[in-house]
Image: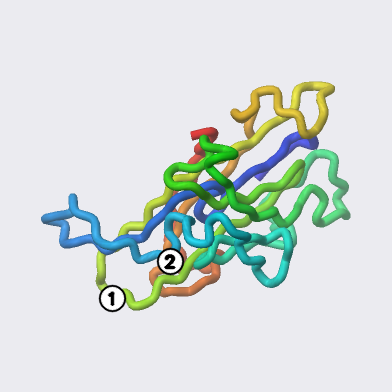
Amino acid sequence: MNDSSRRKIFTAVLIGTIFFSWIALLPMPSVAQETGPNLLTNGDFEQGGGGAWPFQDNIAEVQIAPGWHAFWLDNRPSYVTPASYCSADDQNCSWARPEFRDTKSYEFAYRVHGGNYSQKYFTFNQQHEAGLYQKVNGIVPGSLLRFQIYAQTWSCQPAPGGAWNDCPTTPNSNNPAPMHTRVGIDPTGQTNPWAATVVWSQEVDTYDT
């Protein structure tokens, strides 16, 4: 992920910044139009809505919808290009763990696909690699599954000479940075998002939609 010194990053790597999701059992292909039950716990992020979501590992900046788990890289990996203002000996310059919070429809209706809540994570003027996951148990081997999400990404570069936190095109993105958003399933049931067993979708950018 590349960035400039003035760009605010709001990215997703595993399953999106603001999303509504489900993993469903599907019938045999002959009747593939039908959709089975949602196998996710709190797949719509409504559980616990209206109250404070729990802090993962007692970290106040990592507030996660019940049933989900956050992941992130504390150190910038070698394949990421640091911001242009970083010196070569500063390993984590422009790199940070994102902040995880809820999004409420009555505050940001355009950032909730359905219902009243969605999950978000973000950094300001930083890069990150992060996401959320959930382990689904009790699936019979050979079952046909579909994992689907709604995700929205946002990134803004302030106007020249403007304040770092003033986006001239709010609520839309402005000259957005690449997001590298993708979705993955590990059919072996591991919870390591960097494992070679994860089957990933192609990367997409979903700015403001």
Residue at the far left: name it.
30
Q: Is residue 172 left or right of residue 39?
A: right
- State the image quarter where residue 130 is shown: bottom right
Kind of residue sitting beneath label 2: Thr
On residue 141, the disc is 1
Q: Secondary structure at mark 1?
A: loop
Neighbourhood count class around disc 2 (C-alpha, 10 Å): few under 14, some 14–19, many 20 upward? some
N-terminal label among 2 and 1: 2
On residue 41, the disc is 2
The residue at the point 53 percent across, 65 percent down is 66
On residue 193, the disc is none
Q: Nearer the viewer, residue 5 or 41?
A: 41
Q: CA distance from mark 2 to mark 1?
A: 20 Å
Q: Nearer the viewer, residue 134 or 7?
A: 134
Judge whether 157 appears above or below 49 on screen: above
Give percent across and percent down for residue 189: 43, 74
Give percent across and percent down for residue 32: 18, 54
Give percent across and percent down for residue 194: 56, 65
- State the image quarter where residue 159 is shown: top right
- State the image quarter where residue 42 is shown: bottom left
The residue at the point 52 percent across, 71 percent down is 191
The residue at the point 40 percent across, 64 percent down is 40
The residue at the point 51 percent across, 63 percent down is 133
